[in-house]
Image (cartoon, rainbow, N blue to C red):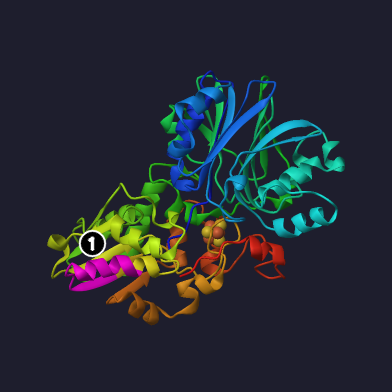
Amino acid sequence: MGRPREYCGLFGVFDCDDAVEKVYLGLYSLQHRGEESAGIASSDGTRIIHHRGPGLVNDAFTPQILKGLKNPHAIGHVRYSTFGPSNIDNAQPLVVRYSKGEVAIAHNGQLLDAGTLREDYEVHGSIFHTTSDTEVIVHLMAKPSHVEKPNLSHVLNHLRGAFSLLFLTNDEMVGVRDPNGFRPLLLGKVNNSYVMASETCALDQIGAEYIRDVKPGEVIYVNKDGLKSEIYCSPRRIRPSYCIFELIYFSRPDSKVFGESVHLFRKRLGMKLAEELPVDADIVIAVPDGGNSAALGYSLASGIPLDYGFIRNHYVGRTFTQPQQRGRHQRVELKLNAVSEVVEGKKVVVVDDSIVRGTTSRSRLGLLRKAGAREIHVRISCPPHRFPCYYGIDFQIKDELIAANYTLEEIEKFLDVESLGYLSAEGLLSCTSSPRNFCTACFTGDYPVPSEASGKKISKREIKGRKSVTV
Ligand code: SF4
C-alpha cells in the first residue's frame, strides 16, 4: 500500500437537547479522519452511557441506538489506529469508572512513551483492557497521587507526544491540546451550547459558530457554570508545532485548520509548485480528491489548462480500508478511472498531495499510461517523506518510505514517469502565515519532541503495538 492514514476525529457538545444527534452529524463530517470505528458517550448529569461500533459512522449507529443514547452532554470519536491493532476494544470513547467517578475519553494523536508507561504499570499490577495508548491516560488518572490533585493538569503534565483530548464526566466536558498543538482542536458554540471539534467543517455541519482554537498547552472545562480555561504546563514547554500534513493532506478542504483555509493553502502550494518546477505540458490534472486544490493552483500559475484526467468513483470506500494488500490494489483500480479522451497523446502534469510508499501512485499513474498519455510529469505538493512520524500518522517505519530509500531517478523509474518533482520545504513553509509554528519532521527529520524512536531505544511493546504496512 498506500496512502497515509488519518488518525482520529473528535466532536463534543455540552448542554444541548439534541447533543447526541449533533455529535452524530459532527462525526459524519469528520469521517475522513477515521473509518475503522465510531463511538459516542453521553451523560444526563448522573451517569455515562455509550455505544461504539466498527466501520463508518453510518454503520456504527442506527436511529434506535442514537435514541437510546439521548442525553444533553455527549462526546464522539472516529478512529483510525496508529497504536494498537484495529479492534472494537480499542474503539473510543473509552469509558471507565475509577475512584473519582465515571469518565469517557476520546483521543486524537499518539503518546510518545505509551509503551514504556504501559510496561511500568503492568509490572506494578495494572490490568489493561485495550492495546491503545489512550488507556495509559486512564491509568495515570487513577494513580492515587494524581486522584488527590484538584484537576487534570497534574496528569496532563505527565503526557508526552501528540494529544488532542476530549473528556466527558457526568457533569463536565473537557478539551485538551498538547503543548505543541500537533493535532487540531477547536471551540465553537451552537445556540448557548459549547462545542469542541477537530475541524471547522464539523461545526458548519451543525450550524455552530467557530469561536477559537484550543491553544497548545490549554485545558478548557465546560460545565453548568460556563467555560473555564487554563494553561496546564509551564510556558517553556509550549512550542507550537502544528502538523503541516493536516493542511497538505488530512483535513477537509472546506475546513479552516490552524488558522488557514485548507483549500486556499493547497492552492498556494500548487502555485508555488508551478514556480519551482515548471513543465512544458498540454494539460494539468489532479489525482482526486487530495490533489484537486493544488492542481488548480498549478494551472492558474502556469497558464496550462486544468482538466479532469481521472474520475473518481465515490461509491468505493477509501483505498486503505481493506486490510489485505490484494484488496487495496483492486480498490485503487475501482476507485479511479483515467479519461482517455482527455489524456490520450498529451503531455500531462499530474498533481498529487504526497507519495509516501509509492505503490498506490504507481497503480494510478499506470492507469494514465494505459489511457494513452504521451508524457507523464508528476508534481507533488510537499517535500519527499524521508522520516517517520511519531505524532499520530501511520508512517512510522523508515523502510516503508519510498523517498527515504530510493533516489529521485529510481522513484521516477518505479512510477514509470518522464519526470517527478517535489515542492521544497522552504516553498511549503512560505505558503503558511506562520512558518515557525509548524512541524515538518517527516520531511526534515527535525523532531519538535524527541522520542525514543527518533533517537533512543524503542521498547519492544511499542514496536509490537505499531501497525506494519507492507508496500
Ligand atoms: S512528522 Fe509530519 S505527519 Fe507527523 S506531525 Fe510532523 S508534519 Fe505531521
Please, what is the three-letter code of the amino acid marked with disc 1?
A: Val
Position in image of residue 296 (x %, y %): 27, 54
| Badge 1: residue crowd in 10 Å (few <14, some 14–19, many ≥20) | many
Q: Residue at x 31, y 62 (%)?
A: 351
In the image, residue 250 sits, relative to residue 419, either above or below, namely: above
Pointer 1 residue: 284
Q: Is residue 450 visible?
A: no
**Range shown magenta:** 362-377
- Residue 16 lies in magenta, yes or no? no
Quadrant, the N terminus: bottom left
* Left or right of residue 303: residue 68: right
Q: Is residue 338 above or below residue 196?
A: below
Residue at figure coordinates x 30%, y 65% from the top left: 364
Point 83% across, 37% down: residue: 147
Q: Quadrant of residue 324?
A: bottom left
Q: Quadrant of ligand 1?
A: bottom right
Secondary structure beneath label 1: strand
Q: Is residue 366 magenta?
A: yes
Residue at 40% in and 51% down: 265
Classify 36 as above or below 116.
Answer: above
The picture quadrant where one finds residue 281 is bottom left
**x, y (%) of residue 110?**
62, 53
Residue 302 in sight from this viewpoint:
yes
Q: Is residue 130 left or right of residue 4?
A: right
